């Protein structure tokens, strides 16, 4: 029977089959013991071992074995055997002891297993309830929620996501997320793996946020979305995608930015006029006012300046929002550049009684070498310290504004103590740090510090005031310079702000400087005017700004060179041959003189006019090439209408 049930047993009858096999085993051992001598049987130990498992099958099995033992004792006592009373103690010992041990051992374990089963059932019930609540919560969320596994296969999609992207649940489940969540960049191109926030979250197991991508729905409608991808568990376990439509929000932000930009631009002009007139009133050489009026006008002038700076900040913020911030990188020595900015703010610190220390140049000394800067500190004896030169290729206006803003904030929020500015770095980056001993920033405000219009709201900051635009603008300017900005602070113990910008080595800096010089020289040469050389002795040479040649589509090149014409004194120059013109462009009334005469740069500045008249061929060109359209008025010979060649 055991062999049959081992090879084949229905799952729902396993307990009954096991109990049947055990009962058959008990009966077999009992018959064996009785037939081989009863209590004196050599197989009594087998009986004790077998009955020790009775409690596994519950109290029913124990009751059956106890009933069998009682029946056997009654049988012995009723048989008239005089030795039955002597065999009773060992019979009870060999029959009852295994049952007691079985009950103690297996019943407790059964209770423990029952407790585990109960706990398991309770946990399963609780998880079922949580799962039901989670489904209710996820389905009630207005944002789209999609869960994907480590292969990017969609395993969950809530109704909001179905409504946003236009896919139904049955069609989306089991598909690759790229087929359902179609993202394109600002160029209307499908995102690459590096731009895809879902792919990046699955690869790096870090949360990824993005608000610059566009979602293409199933009906080819394009929506600006804010998407947050959070990984699940360990790397490769999957991710949760939460996204929402921000098209309307972006439109409102754009309209708000346009309003702020227009209003700030319009109001800045009268404020500048007010500031200018107040400055004239404060000038003793222009106006004579008494001390009381001067005090009033001074305060009004300072308020007008503050209002002008506020309007400028609003304009810069609107430009940053619309990605209209100009970026004109130039090579700069950051240590010297920052020193000039800080020195301009030193009077503000001195007015509050603060100590300002610039670590790279604590004594204000000048650098000693281009590669390694030397600073001499005199305190009884000469001490020489060396600091490296930090070159950066960034927009100088952006860098100046960020440094000035950070130092001004340090001075503003420091009542007593020090403001310490330091510049450090490695081969790749330069770090500018501004440390103060001011009021500090609470930990709960640190994550929002660089947000637009955000200000720390406590008693100290209310007294100081501010707009909440400075640090936001610093962050946007730092990003425009391919850098970053962050802060470390402890409330009531001061703050340290860090600005990191890319660093370039000395050779690269020198190369960029030389290229900038060459560009400046080329621009200067391009701004020089070619001469319109008149042939009359009564006229002198004059220079007009040069104009770059127009594209080939405007004029067609002449098929054959034109021989130079030697002009004669006091005569009109020979008109050049007609130039064929395309039908799509109307040729000017005349070709410019710069196309037929030599540029002023090739003629000596003090060449006598008689020399030109005697050898005109040396100062003319063949007329080959394309004539260019004049950009400025030209000089004409005397008595010649301006509209004739």
Image (tube, grey):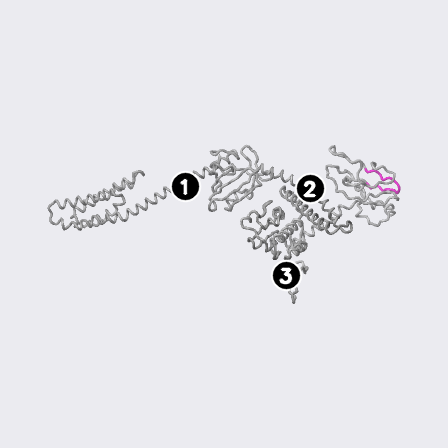
Disc 2: CA contacts within 10 A as few (<14), some (14-19) or many (>=20): few
In the picture of the structure, the residue carrying the numbered disc 2 is: 267
Decide which of tag 3 and tag 1 comes sooner along the chain. Answer: 1
**Cα separation between marks 3 and 1:** 66 Å
Disc 3: CA contacts within 10 A as few (<14), some (14-19) or many (>=20): some
Q: Nearer the viewer, residue 455 or 143?
A: 455
Report if residue 568 lies within the magenta region. Answer: yes
**Image position of 178 (left or right of 78):** right
Q: Secondary structure at mark 3?
A: strand
- Are the residues flagged by discs 3 and 1 in contact, CB closer than 8 Å? no
Mainly helix, strand or loop, the magenta region? loop
In the picture of the structure, the residue carrying the numbered disc 3 is: 386
Residue 519 position (above or below residue 578)? below
Q: Secondary structure at mark 1?
A: helix
Picture quarter with the C terminus? top right
Single out the mark in the foreground, 2 or 3: 2
Decide which of tag 2 and tag 1 comes sooner along the chain. Answer: 1
- Specify the segment rendered in magenta: 563-576
In the picture of the structure, the residue carrying the numbered disc 1 is: 127
Q: Can residue 506 be spotted in the picture?
A: no
Q: Residue furthest bottom?
A: 380
Q: Which mark is residue 536?
A: none
Q: Nearer the viewer, residue 353 or 480?
A: 353
Q: Secondary structure at mark 2?
A: helix
Decide which of tag 2 and tag 3 comes sooner along the chain. Answer: 2
Residue 453 position (above or below residue 429)? above
């Amino acid at each position: 029977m055991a062999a049959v049930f081992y090879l084949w047993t229905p799952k729902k009858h396993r307990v009954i089959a096991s109990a049947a096999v055990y009962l058959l085993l008990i009966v077999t051992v009992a018959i064996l013991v009785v037939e081989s001598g009863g209590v004196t049987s050599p197989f009594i130990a087998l009986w004790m071992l077998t009955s020790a498992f009775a409690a596994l099958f519950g109290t029913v099995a124990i009751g059956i074995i106890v009933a069998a033992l009682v029946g056997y004792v009654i049988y012995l006592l009723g048989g008239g055997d005089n030795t039955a009373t002597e065999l009773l103690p060992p019979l009870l010992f060999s029959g009852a002891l295994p049952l007691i041990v079985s009950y103690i051992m297996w019943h407790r374990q059964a209770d423990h297993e029952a407790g585990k089963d109960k706990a398991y059932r309770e946990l399963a019930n609780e998880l079922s309830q949580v799962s039901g609540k989670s489904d209710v919560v996820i389905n009630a969320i207005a944002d789209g929620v999609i869960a994907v596994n480590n292969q990017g296969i969609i395993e969950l999609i809530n109704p909001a996501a179905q409504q946003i992207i236009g896919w139904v649940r049955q069609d989306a489940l089991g598909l690759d997320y790229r087929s359902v969540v179609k993202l394109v960049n600002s160029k209307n191109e499908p995102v690459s793996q590096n731009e895809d926030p879902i792919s990046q979250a699955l690869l790096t197991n870090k949360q990824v946020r993005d608000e610059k991508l566009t979602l293409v729905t199933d009906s080819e409608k394009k929506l600006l979305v804010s998407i947050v991808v959070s990984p699940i568990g360990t790397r490769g376990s999957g991710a949760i995608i939460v996204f929402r439509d921000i098209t309307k929000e972006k439109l409102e932000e754009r309209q708000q930015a346009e309003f702020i930009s227009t209003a700030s631009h319009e109001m800045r002009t009268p404020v500048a006029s007010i500031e200018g007139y107040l400055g004239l009133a404060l000038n003793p050489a222009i106006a004579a006012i008494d001390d009381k009026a001067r005090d009033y006008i001074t305060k009004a002038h300072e308020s007008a300046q503050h209002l002008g700076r506020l309007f400028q900040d609003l304009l810069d913020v609107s430009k940053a929002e619309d990605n209209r911030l100009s970026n004109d990188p130039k090579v700069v020595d950051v240590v010297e550049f920052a020193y000039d900015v800080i020195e301009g703010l030193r009077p503000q610190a001195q007015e509050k009684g603060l100590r300002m220390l610039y670590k790279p140049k604590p004594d204000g000394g000048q650098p000693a070498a281009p590669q390694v800067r030397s600073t001499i500190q005199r305190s009884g004896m000469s001490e020489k310290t060396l600091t490296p030169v930090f070159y950066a290729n960034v927009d100088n206006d952006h860098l100046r504004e960020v440094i000035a803003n950070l130092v001004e904030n340090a001075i503003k929020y420091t009542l007593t103590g020090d403001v310490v500015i330091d510049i450090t770095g490695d081969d790749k980056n330069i770090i500018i740090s501004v440390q103060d001993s001011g009021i500090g920033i609470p930990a709960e405000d640190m994550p929002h510090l660089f947000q637009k219009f955000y200000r720390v709201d406590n008693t100290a900051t209310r007294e100081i005031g501010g707009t909440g635009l400075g640090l936001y603008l610093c962050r946007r300017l730092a990003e425009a310079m391919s850098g970053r900005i962050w802060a470390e602070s402890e409330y009531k113990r001061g703050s340290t702000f860090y600005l990191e910008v890319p660093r370039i080595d000395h050779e690269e800096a020198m190369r960029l400087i030389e290229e900038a010089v060459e560009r400046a020289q080329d621009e200067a040469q391009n701004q020089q005017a070619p001469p319109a050389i008149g042939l009359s002795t009564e006229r002198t040479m004059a220079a007009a700004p040069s104009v770059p040649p127009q594209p080939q589509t405007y004029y067609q090149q002449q098929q054959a060179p034109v021989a130079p014409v030697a002009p004669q004194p006091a005569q009109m120059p020979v008109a050049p041959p007609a130039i064929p013109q395309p039908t799509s462009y109307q040729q000017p009334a005349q070709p410019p003189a710069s196309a037929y005469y030599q540029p002023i740069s090739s003629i000596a500045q003090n060449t006598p006019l008689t020399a030109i008249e005697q050898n005109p061929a040396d100062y003319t060109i063949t007329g080959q090439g394309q004539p260019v359209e004049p950009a400025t008025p030209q000089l004409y010979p005397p008595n010649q209408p301006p509209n004739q060649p």
